[in-house]
Image (cartoon, rainbow, N blue to C red):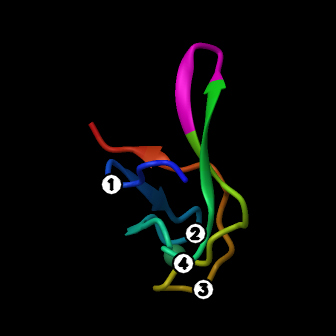
Amino acid sequence: MADTSNWVIQCDNCGKEYDIPKDIPTKIEDMEGTEQLVLKVSPKCPYCYTINSRLAKHMS
Ligand SMILES: [Zn+2]
């Protein structure tokens, strides 16, 4: 499982950011030379309960 500490999910619906759920396995994929954290299952926003993308957002 990848280190998720520098990654968050940003909700497509309400725009809030939240931590990668600890119960969802993750992996790092190389997307055109950029590392992308991908979740195995789509996460659900804890604020508005929308199902979000499996692609995490890197915090810089
Ligand atoms: Zn939301």
**Quadrant occupied by the C terminus:** top left
Label 4 CB-ligand 1 distance < 8 A:
yes
Q: Which of the two discs, 4 and 2, sits closer to the camera?
A: 4
The span from disc 1 to disc 2 (Cα, nearest Å) is 23 Å
The span from disc 3 to disc 1 (Cα, nearest Å) is 22 Å
Seen at 72% across and 59% down, the residue is 40
Label 2 CB-ligand 1 distance < 8 A:
yes
Q: Are marks 4 and 2 in contact (CB under 8 Å)?
A: yes
> Front-most of 48 and 3?
3
The span from disc 4 to disc 1 (Cα, nearest Å) is 18 Å
Label 1 CB-ligand 1 distance < 8 A:
no
Name the amino acid type tagged 2.
Answer: Asn
Seen at 53% across and 21% down, the residue is 34
Name the amino acid type tagged 3.
Answer: Tyr
Disc 1 crowd rating (10 Å Cα; few below 14, some 14-19, many 20+) is few
Spot occupied by residue 1 in the image (x, y as percentages of width and height):
55, 53
Q: Quadrant of residue 39?
A: bottom right
Q: Closer to the N terminus: mark 2 or mark 3?
A: 2
Q: Which of the two discs, 3 and 1, sits closer to the camera?
A: 1
Give left or right: position of 42 versus 47: right
Seen at 60% across and 55% down, the residue is 26
Disc 4 crowd rating (10 Å Cα; few below 14, some 14-19, many 20+) is many
The magenta-colored residue range is 31-36
Give left or right: position of 53 versus 3: right
Q: Are marks 3 and 4 in contact (CB under 8 Å)?
A: yes
Q: Give the label on residue 49, or none.
A: 3
List the residue tagged with mark 4: 45
Q: Closer to the N terminus: mark 1 or mark 2?
A: 1
Relative to 28, say whether 15 is above or below.
Answer: below
List the residue tagged with mark 1: 5
Seen at 65% across and 24% down, the residue is 31
Q: Closer to the N terminus: mark 4 or mark 2?
A: 2
